Amino acid sequence: MKQLLFIQAQERFDDAELPAMVRAVNQWQRLSARPLVHAIAPGNHLSMLNQDNAHTVAEILRAWMALEESVDSAPEALELLSA
């Protein structure tokens, strides 16, 4: 089954924001018939795609695609996505 990828900006992931972020991820999960994969990228909503951070987003996308393509690569991909 195909999974949805939810990439969250690191700036929004701190102890004060954690309960709100957990609720947001849970709400997305309830809205989807497919499993949700949650990953965190450095930066904020805009800067996570700038030159300094884009390589991390690319790594997250590669790991997520590996999850979709092969069960054998799933453990490495899950490790990257949960970092």
Image (cartoon, rainbow, N blue to C red):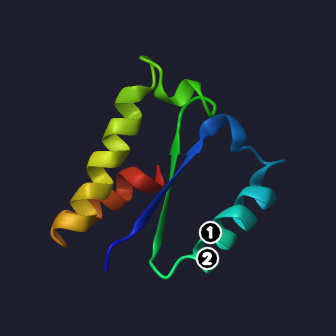
Q: Is residue 9 above or below residue 31?
A: above
Mark drawn on residue 28 = 1
Number of the label disc, if any, that sits on residue 31:
2
Which residue is more in the foreground, 69 or 78? 69
Q: CA distance from mark 1 to mark 2?
A: 5 Å
Q: Is residue 71 left or right of residue 10?
A: left
How many numbered discs, if any?
Answer: 2
- Which SS class for mark 1? helix
- Density class for disc 2 (Cα within 10 Å; few <14, some 14-19, many ≥20) is few
Where is residue 10 shown, x and y percent of the image? 61, 38
Crowding at dot 1, Cα within 10 Å, few <14 / some 14-19 / many 20+, comes out as some
Q: Is residue 61 left or right of residue 66?
A: right
Residue at (35, 29) in percent of width and height: 55
Q: Amino acid at mark 1?
A: Trp
Q: Is residue 19 left or right of residue 78?
A: right
* Disc 2, SS: helix
Q: Residue at x 64, y 65 (%)?
A: 25
**Residue 81 at x, y percent in the picture:** 42, 53
Please state, as top left, top right, bottom left or bottom right, where the N terminus lies in the image. bottom left
Amino acid type, residue under disc 2 in the picture: Leu
Q: Are marks 1 and 2 in contact (CB under 8 Å)?
A: yes
Q: Residue at x 36, y 61 (%)?
A: 78
